Amino acid sequence: MRYISTRGEAPALGFEDVLLTGLAPDGGLYVPESLPHFNLEEIRSWRGLSYAELAFNIMYPFVEEAIPEADFRQMLDETYGVFAHKAVAPLVQLDTNEWVLELFRGPTLAFKDFALQLLGRLLDYVLGKRQEHAVIMGATSGDTGSAAIEGCRRCEHVDIFILHPYQRVSEVQRRQMTTVQGDNIHNIAVRGNFDDCQRMVKESFGDQSFLGGKARLAAVNSINWARIMAQIVYYFHASLALGGPDRSMAFSVPTGNFGDIFAGYLAKKMGLPVSQLVIATNKNDILHRFMSGNKYEQHQLEHTLSPSMDIMVSSNFERLLFDLHGRDGQAVKQLLENAAKGPVSIEDYRWKSARKLFDSAAVDDKTTCDTIREVYEQNEYLLDPHTAIGVHAARACRRDVQVPMITLGTAHPAKFPDAITDSGLTIKPELPAHMADLFEREERYTVLDNDRASVQAFIAEHWKNA
Ligand SMILES: *Cc1c(COP(=O)(O)O)cnc(C)c1O
């Protein structure tokens, strides 16, 4: 399988290089040149498979040139073996034909574990084979760094440095990152804000000379193709559990960078009957504004009760734009260059073709809290604020009550207790048993000045083979 850039000017790569590369040199994102397609009979024959077995069938075509079958099976058994629920991604019923797919039973209680647990193992495998070492550098505003760290904790060929703004992340968020034990795990608290952290990471990718040419810098952010690939699986898994592929499904997806929902779009293209995808956003609603009015325009960042969806642009949306433009990289490049200067639209027939599958809703904090409270009162089931946005959008956009509507449950409610309090409920969500001693665990992190040279010097000194 070859991977091409959405901006049409970078050379095609194989899986290993795509895994290690991140952004394409022309500024685009990698997508498979063609997708595997499964017919209904084949999908039907997967009923009853374990999550890891199903994951193998769906993902192997993407990686087969890089990884022998038995090695990939073992990797998947390990990856999905760390999830706390035996079904890995269990379904919970809210109402007639209405479900939540719980994707938060992994080590950091958010759906990012599905991709990052696999990504860490894939990186380690490929780097080991090449006898190379990678230094991962990333910035977090608090809630997503832990999944990357957990994903790399067992890697021999990877050191990970995650920058977070000093004293500006919550204690639970900090502890989820700083209590993970491992010589290759490095938490840096920068005396600055999240933008400072992100800028340092970006500049370091631009000039990697501080590593002295002995290691490559790798990114694990949401544009990494392998992350998208891993997220395709649970759409099939949920559908098979509810009578697919012999009936069609609708999914509502709490959306930020458009990675998770793009995986649902790919599942459909690979043969899964999906009749509707709902883009559920918070007040950072660039995608809702596009889907409802064909206008793509960047606004200011808003801070909301669902911080993992606080974005100004949705990086993976470029992958959908590429398909909507008949895979014409030049057209995508032009469009996004224009979008950097002001609002843009696409041709009406292209926009309408997106609207055949996608609906959208933007949900404010008050409605998020109302949804948390209503669902708790009706079902004694506690939603986290991201999932609550998904449930509200699902109900608002539903096209056909005969079609099962599945909202992706992206985080455990105990990760975001403030939203529960704001919703007026007096219950306090408990951390699951495997996290209950979080506040007793030993923390490790280093506080550094808001200065790129100091951070780079720290990294150069502390990665394994430095
Ligand atoms: C990352 C995240 C999202 C958004 O996912 P995207 O793939 O960026 O659209 C939604 N909810 C939670 C809890 C997340 O961590």
Image: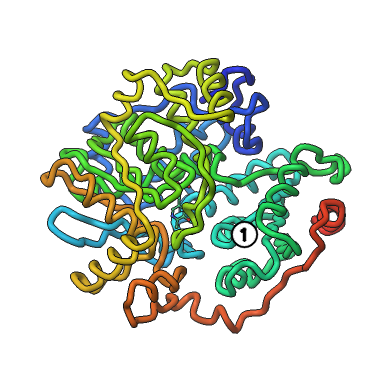
Q: Camera-side residue: 40 or 31?
A: 31
| Residue at 62%, 34% in the rendered image | 16
Where residue 162 appears, as percent x and y from the top left, is: 68, 57
The image shows residue 374, relative to residue 63, as above or below, that is below
Q: Is residue 247 visible?
A: yes
Write down the residue under mark 1. Answer: 149
Q: Camera-side residue: 444 or 53?
A: 444
Label 1 Cα crowd, 10 Å radius (few <14 / some 14-19 / many 20+): many
The image shows residue 285, relative to residue 190, as above or below, that is above
What amino acid type is highlighted by mark number 1?
Ile
Q: Is mark 1 within 8 Å of ligand 1?
A: no
Where residue 63 appears, as percent x and y from the top left, is: 52, 34
In this picture, residue 224 sits left or right of residue 380: right
Where residue 70 appears, as percent x and y from the top left, is: 50, 43
| Residue at 70%, 55% in the rendered image | 160
| Residue at 19%, 55% in the rendered image | 98
Asked which quadrant contains residue 370, the reply is bottom left
Q: Camera-side residue: 218 or 364?
A: 364
In this picture, residue 428 sits left or right of residue 341: left
| Residue at 44%, 63% in the rendered image | 305
